[in-house]
């Protein structure tokens, strides 16, 4: 199991309680990387020092640059972050202010997949060699970007909540196809 902290895991104490449980082997404020089955995995922490948007910071940007420098450009990369690494809806804090810099270090790779939460809804977007996937929520749904003045929990009719909650599973197989993405609701 690979985890990255959400803003509720790190806003009260700078993430120290989160890291005491899940931070074994991580660097800095909890970021990490490893290789598994030919895939390079990077876990980023963009929920500390929040102003409006997610933020990685220079130490983490340096980590990403150094981490991918020695990899072959055909190495598939999967990046985990809580807040999206693209500007999904900055007015609501749905983006990371320095993500463009982090992603610039991965331009030479043929396949980069970024997985995030935070927005509590399914969303997929591709920009060049990077495909972004936002997972749904296991807590409560939020409105679509721009529906309302702020991302406040959506009230659903009785019996419909389980249809809005779910888990997204990503399966990697070597080959010429895209990652297999499977969504399932919590029923």
Image (spheres, rainbow, N blue to C red):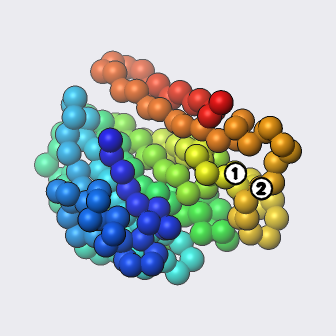
Residue 28, above or below 167: below
Element type where label 1 sits in the image: loop
Query: Residue 154, labelled with which disc?
Result: 2
Looking at marks 2 and 1 on the same chain, the residue that comes earlier in the sequence is marked by 1
Name the quadrant containing residue 65.
bottom left
Q: Classify 32 as above or below 176.
A: below
Q: Position of residue 104 (x, y in %)?
A: 36, 58
Query: Which residue position is annotated with label 1?
Result: 141
Indicate left or right for 169 with 153 as reference: left
> Does the residue at mark 2 contact the one at mark 1 (Cβ under 8 Å)?
yes
Query: How dense is the environment of label 1, judged by Cα within 10 Å: few (below 14), some, or many (20 and up)?
Result: many
How crowded is the residue under tag 2: few (<14 C-alpha within 10 Å), some, or many (20+)?
Answer: few
The reply to whether residue 103 is in sight is no
Q: Tell me the CA gap for discs 2 and 1.
A: 6 Å
- Direction from residue 30 to residue 144 in the image, left or right: right
Q: Does residue 53 lie above or below 181 as drawn?
A: below
Q: Is any part of residue 33 visible from this angle?
A: yes
Residue at x 44% of width, y 66% of height = 9
Q: Position of residue 122 (x, y in %)?
A: 62, 42
| Corner quadrant of residue 151 | bottom right
Say which residue appears at 74% left-offset and 69% top-offset.
Answer: 150
Residue ranking furthest to the right: 157
Q: Which mark is residue 84?
A: none
């Amino acid at each position: 199991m690979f985890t990255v902290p959400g803003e509720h895991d790190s806003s009260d104490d700078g993430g120290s309680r989160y890291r005491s449980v899940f931070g074994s082997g991580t660097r800095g404020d909890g970021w990490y990387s490893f290789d598994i089955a030919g895939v390079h995995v990077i876990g980023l922490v963009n929920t500390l020092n929040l102003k409006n948007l997610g933020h990685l910071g220079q130490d983490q940007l340096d980590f990403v640059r150094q981490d991918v420098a020695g990899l072959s450009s055909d190495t598939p990369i999967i990046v985990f972050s809580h807040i999206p690494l693209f500007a999904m809806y900055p007015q609501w804090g749905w983006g990371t202010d320095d993500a463009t810099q982090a992603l610039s270090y991965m331009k030479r790779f043929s396949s980069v997949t970024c997985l995030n939460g935070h927005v509590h809804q399914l969303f997929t977007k591709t920009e060049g060699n990077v495909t972004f996937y936002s997972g749904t929520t296991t807590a409560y749904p939020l409105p679509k970007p721009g529906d309302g003045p702020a991302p406040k929990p959506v009230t659903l009719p009785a019996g419909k909540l389980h249809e809005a909650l779910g888990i997204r599973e990503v399966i990697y197989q070597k080959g010429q196809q895209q990652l297999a993405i499977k969504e399932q609701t919590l029923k």
